[in-house]
Image (cartoon, rainbow, N blue to C red):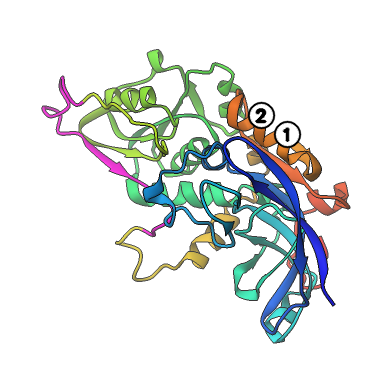
Amino acid sequence: MSDTSLAFWSTGYGRGELRPAVLRPPATGEVLVRSLYSAVSRGTESLVFRGEVPESEYQRMRAPFQEGDFPGPVKYGYISVGVVEDGAGPQAAALHGRTVFCLHPHQDRYLVPASAVIPLPPGLSPARAVLAANMETALNACWDGAPGMGDRIAVVGAGVVGSLVAWLCARIPGTEVELIDIDPGRAQIARALGLTHRLPANARAECDLVFHASGHPAGLSTALDLAGQEASVIEMSWYGRTAVTVGLGGAFHARRLNIKSSQVGHIPPQRSPRWHYRRRMELALSQLVDPRLDALISGETGFQDLPALMQRLAYTPAGALCERIRYPGVSTLDAHTPHSGDPSCTA
């Protein structure tokens, strides 16, 4: 017999709603997941919500379990943490009761192949595991930038991804890392993560490596100003349909600066012979065990209020970092108890 669930859809150009979805029984090799938490990837999902995905990117921008097409209506998202409640076949049976991460849109219950879910590592709470997709993006950026021991590194943009990049780089021996943002309030986030915050006017120049993750063209100009001779600027921001003006005059050529794009959709070529997407996500999850990263969760909203939250994040997002979505029936114990690694664990 079929069952039903609820899913969030961006219906087009700044509107969204919860829609019912039919759930059939799991086929062999599939699992049924009950959501505990999801999270909004604010930059990308806001562009989707506002209908600002360029036509040239309609296919490349598709999420793994997306339904519908851009500009909408579209069921879009890729951050979900839940419990496997049912399944069919040996692989699914081994996952029964496990708390897992999945690149799935916002939906209270859903069916996916068993291979699409990744059990949380021991010590990681479901509540913090919603940072997994952001951590994966940050890891990929570090691979693209290749920070080294002793490097002076600036990260421009103290959002979730920029903060995670700075946090990863600061763990490399001898590095001197500054997290740059125009918002003085980001200093509190930096302190919680053991990082140094600087306003652009006070940032150190002549850096060996600069990451740009602010999402604003002015931030890219700041990143170029902070780069030292022959240094690289790793551009992580995606602007959708917005045209960006970059200042390539002045000393840009004399300093032989390099601007390199980074995008999580591809594993860097120097690693692709040995790494696959699942291995990268497993690494990302393993890096989230540190409770200090809870500082990157700026709010929590019930699933039923997600349409209103998306409206706010798409148009008035001031101060928002990772906005977590809580699903019905989730208790404090379910959400915040670290996963034990026991296959019989239900939270």
**Number of numbered discs present?**
2
Q: Which amino acid does label 1 sit on?
A: Ala
- Using a 10 Å C-alpha cutoff, classify the residue at mark 2 as few (fewer than 14 neighbours), some (14 to 19) or many (20 or more): some
Q: Mark 1 points at which residue?
A: 308
Q: What residue type is labelled 2?
A: Arg
Q: Quadrant of residue 11?
A: top right
Q: Name the residue under label 2.
A: 312
Nearer to me, 127 or 208: 127
Question: x%, y% of residue 296?
Answer: 63, 36
Q: In which quarter of the image is residue 64?
A: bottom right
- Identify the mark at residue 64; answer none if there is no mark: none
Give the residue displayed 17% in from the left and 27% down from the top: 252
Magenta portion: prevailing SS class = loop
Give the residue displayed 75% in from the left and 52% down from the top: 19
Say whether residue 8 is magenta: no
Nearer to me, 32 or 298: 32
Residue 345 visible within the image: no
